[in-house]
Image (cartoon, rainbow, N blue to C red):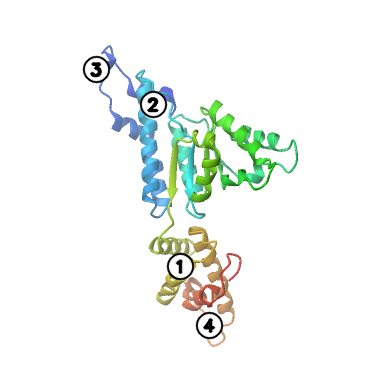
Amino acid sequence: MNEQVLEKDVVSTCGNDVHDTPIDLETTFRESHVQEILDRLDQELVGLQSVKNKIKEMAALLLVDRVRKSLGLTAGAPTLHMTFLGNPGMGKTTVAMRMAEILHRLGYIRKENVMLVTRDDLVGQGIGQTAPKTREVLNNAMGGVLLIDEAYTLYRPDHPGDFGLEAIEILMQVMENQRDDLVVILAGYKQQMEHFFHSNPGMNSRIGLHIEFNDYSVENLMIIANSILRDQHYSFSPDAEKAFREYLIRRKTMPHFANARSVRNAIDRARLRQANRLLNVRDRQIIRQDLMTIEAEDILASRVFREGVPDCESES
């Protein structure tokens, strides 16, 4: 929905004084189809209710801001740049995509595009390389949303002369001067991002919304695991489900745990073990159910269950 359509829907005075014109926000919200996006986000992400509430609140602010503008009530455009704070595998990219849809639907950005980049996409290795790289990324992202993952890596105080500061300066200029045509989302671990903002107060002042993604509980991770299996036409046997729950309890305490991403990786490894197990069945013919079932032994073979042996995302 563009701004002109929204204004037409909200303001239809028919000769009445604009101050007396009823404003039907419920109808305006329904006709924006933003609720459909919020519903999709709710279906896509398990839990994360506080995140979903923040996105809903932001959508409400944007809608009301447009209605106010259509009535000549100006308070300055809301600051749309934001940060996503949390560990990997929490659905930050998915939330960014849905946020872009909402922003586009309400006329705040020209495109629904979300461009995902990291430090390597912005910072060069030598003198004179960073500025053109950063500007190229910003030009390509213009009109949509730029999501910078692990944004805190742009600032490396222990590396004198690091070119990341140049990228930060250019980024801040664009975030300020072209904030009507680009929304920047900075994502990363909470502690590192807080240090980043403390060291770069100019960047922090340009952020309008901070959204924290708390780690999934074991219960939510089990829901995610079963959803992944269902989509791939697999399922846990009862004993395998118990084993995988224990796997998650242990794995969450180990380094490099990445929530839903680690769950998906663990299931991929369990599928590898299941396939190898089935190829070694000699006493009977396998049936369709065998091909669909992950057994406890496919989980318990993980290194997570070996005392004193740390797990690695790239190992079994």
Question: Residue 165's x, y, as percent?
Answer: 64, 38
Of marks 4 and 3, which one's residue comes earlier in the chain?
Answer: 3
Residue assigned mark 3:
20
Real-space Cα distance between discs 2 and 3? 18 Å
Residue at 55 percent of width and 61 percent of height: 256
Residue type, mark 3 in image:
Asp
Q: CA distance from mark 1 to mark 2?
A: 45 Å
Q: Secondary structure at mark 4?
A: loop
Q: Are marks 2 and 4 in contact (CB under 8 Å)?
A: no
**Marks 1, 4: nearer the viewer:** 1
Dot placed on the residue nearer the N-terminal end, 1 or 2: 2
The residue indicated by pointer 4 is: 285
Instruction: Please give left or right for residue 306 compared with residue 137 in the image.
Output: left
Question: Which mark, by number, is residue 66?
Answer: 2
Kind of residue sitting beneath label 4 = Gln
Q: CA distance from mark 1 to mark 3?
A: 59 Å
Instruction: Determine which of the numbered discs, if any, sits on residue 248 in the image.
Output: 1
Mark 2 and mark 4: span between their CA atoms?
65 Å
